[in-house]
Image (tube, rainbow, N blue to C red):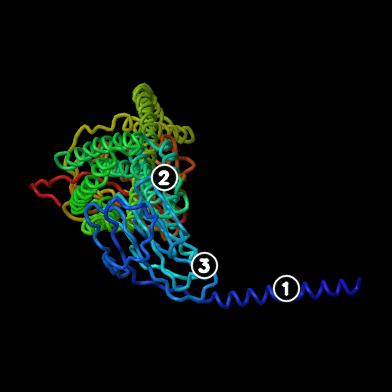
Amino acid sequence: MSLIFKSLHITLVVLLLSAVCGSFLVSARGNYPAGEIRHWQMRWETGPGDGGSKVPVREAEDWIDVEAKAEMPKKPAGVSAAWTKIALPSFNYTSPSVYIQTIYALHVKVYVENRLIFEGDRGFIKDNYSLLVPLDVRDNGKTVYIWTQTLQDRIGIKENVMLGEHSRLIKDYIKNGLIDVILGGAFIFVAAVLFVCSFFLNKEYFPVATSLSIVIASTGVLSVTYSPFTYTFYSYMGAISVFMFDVALLSLLPALTFLFENIFGGGKYGIIRKFRKFQMAYSSFCCVFLVINSLSGGRTLEFYYFISTNIVGIIMILQFILLIGCVIVFSLKRNKDAIIFACGFGTAALTGVLELTWYYLKRGNYDLFYWKWALVVFILSLIVILGRRLAQNHSQVVQYSRELELFNNELQRSEKMEIISELAASVAHEVRNPLQVTRGFLQLLSEKSSGEEQRYLFMALSELDRAASIITDFLTFAKPEFEQISLLHVNDEFMHIQSILLPLCHLNGGKMILEIEEDLWVKGNSSKFKQAMINIIKNSIESLGEEGTIHLLAYSRGDKVHIHIKDNGAGMEPGVLSRLGEPYFSSNKTKGTGLGLMVTFRIIEAMEGEIRFRSKKGAGTESITLLPRAEGPDGSNS
């Protein structure tokens, strides 16, 4: 038994070593790079033909020499099939294969001598084949015959023929057109997401987002259905792919024009709108014939091919030229969206025009390639434009919200002022008369009294005067109209104000600096103007600390007179600053009624001006008053 187990063990080791060494030998033998075959021959099949069943091995006449990447031989009229003869060089590949990246045909048969090794037949108009044909090691030095048949104007091998290891060539075979499928799938996914999101946009942007999603989706479908990868590995879906390609192309053109129209308008004389309507009508006409051709089994194929390929290609060129011209016009007007659109669409349109022109010059012997990458640039520009529109819309909404908030605050303030005005007007007149009578009697009593009694009467009179002052403020707020309006020389008014308040300023340890331009004139009532400025300056004086300074500055800018009153006092917090001018709100004073600034606001408002405050806690406060500039008495103005 032990001998048997030892024998089995040795046998397994030998087999394992043989397999390993064999794999090394195979890899060593198969380590040759793939080679290119640059020369072959073609022969037209005239007459009815035999369907490629008889290989012309012994025939040596009528063969045409063909060079790789050179211009393909022009197919004679009435010919629909051809033979291609490729002489295989000697090789040392363990699993040899022939790879042809592009061969134009609808029906293909591949022979090695008389042995059929591949056959493909397409029942749809897509003549771009990609072939990877495995060979036998015994095919070394033999000849490959390829029979091709088509209904179109091009036939035969377009590029080099590669001969090499199957494991290496299959990578190129799989990658051929795979990037187009990946790119198209990404486009379709982005279009689906954008289409769903478009339902959450307002009505203004819904058509733009929807048309953009159609453009992106159509581009994705075109990329997938134009790729040779689809027809190579999913040939059973070839008819559906051709159908979807036509539908995507016929949807893309009017959707693109509609998107352009929504962004930039119908153009001069409505040319963009008219062209879009023509495209929609023509695309609908082509779609009807597409359905008819599909249902009839391809009986109207030639007519449909003419209207959907030749004429649509011309319409695309006209569309690109038209839109490029409009984009240039809009760009010259410095429209930012037009500039972005020009960069993206200009790239796509110029690429499309050049490729289509080259396609027609080559009589169809050219596969459009660069268009999809140009469309990537174009779609990115469209997304940027849509993003800019949405950002602008968001900014407008935010701005509108801020303005609405300011309007609501102003409305509340106006309502408060209206209520207080009515109360002040009704109460002040009723209270003022009894106060004046009471003050008169108290003054008579004070003249006949002496000592402690007279002191008390003086205190009562001062409180009555204070009450009368508050009532006067009420009346000023309730009726800020001026009984007498005159030209006010700002410099003279502030000189008078300075003479009144300078002692109070010195008493509080501060100083006052006056910088007033000459020949500044405003219209108003002198006493009311002084009252408004005094109220502001008094607040500044009361906020000063040691070595405080109040800076009074006045100058003109345009048709406005700017008056700045700035102090380096205690300052205010933002919450306090926002409430200045509200009734009965006192900023930093414990005994204030809040009527001073309220009256000031009403006086400046009645003078058709405005007042603003800037302040920072611990850094002081600055008031900025803007009043309409008036002409001086000599007819001049500052």
Disc number for residue 16:
1
Dot 2 or dot 1: first in sequence order is 1
What residue would you read off at disc 2?
Answer: 191
Question: Where 16 sits versus 206, above or below?
Answer: below
- Which marked residue is nearer to the observer: mark 2 or mark 1? 1
Secondary structure of residue under mark 3: loop
What residue would you read off at disc 3?
Answer: 136
Label 1 environment density (alpha carbons within 10 Å; few <14, some 14–19, many ≥20): few
Separation of residues labelled 2 and 3 (CA atoms): 47 Å
Question: Where 488 sits versus 98, above or below?
Answer: above
Secondary structure of residue under mark 1: helix
Q: Is residue 554 visible?
A: yes
Q: Residue at x 29, y 29 (%)?
A: 479
Q: Residue at x 24, y 40 (%)?
A: 303
Question: Where 167 sits versus 603, above or below?
Answer: below
Picture coordinates of residue 541 (x, y %)?
39, 51
Residue 98, image quadrant:
bottom left
Residue type, label 2: Ala
Picture coordinates of residue 110 (x, y %)?
42, 59
Left or right: 589, with 77 as reference point: right
Residue type, label 3: Asp
- Check contact, mark 2 vs mark 3: CB within 8 A: no
Question: Where 487 sits versus 447, above or below?
Answer: below
Separation of residues labelled 2 and 1 (CA atoms): 55 Å
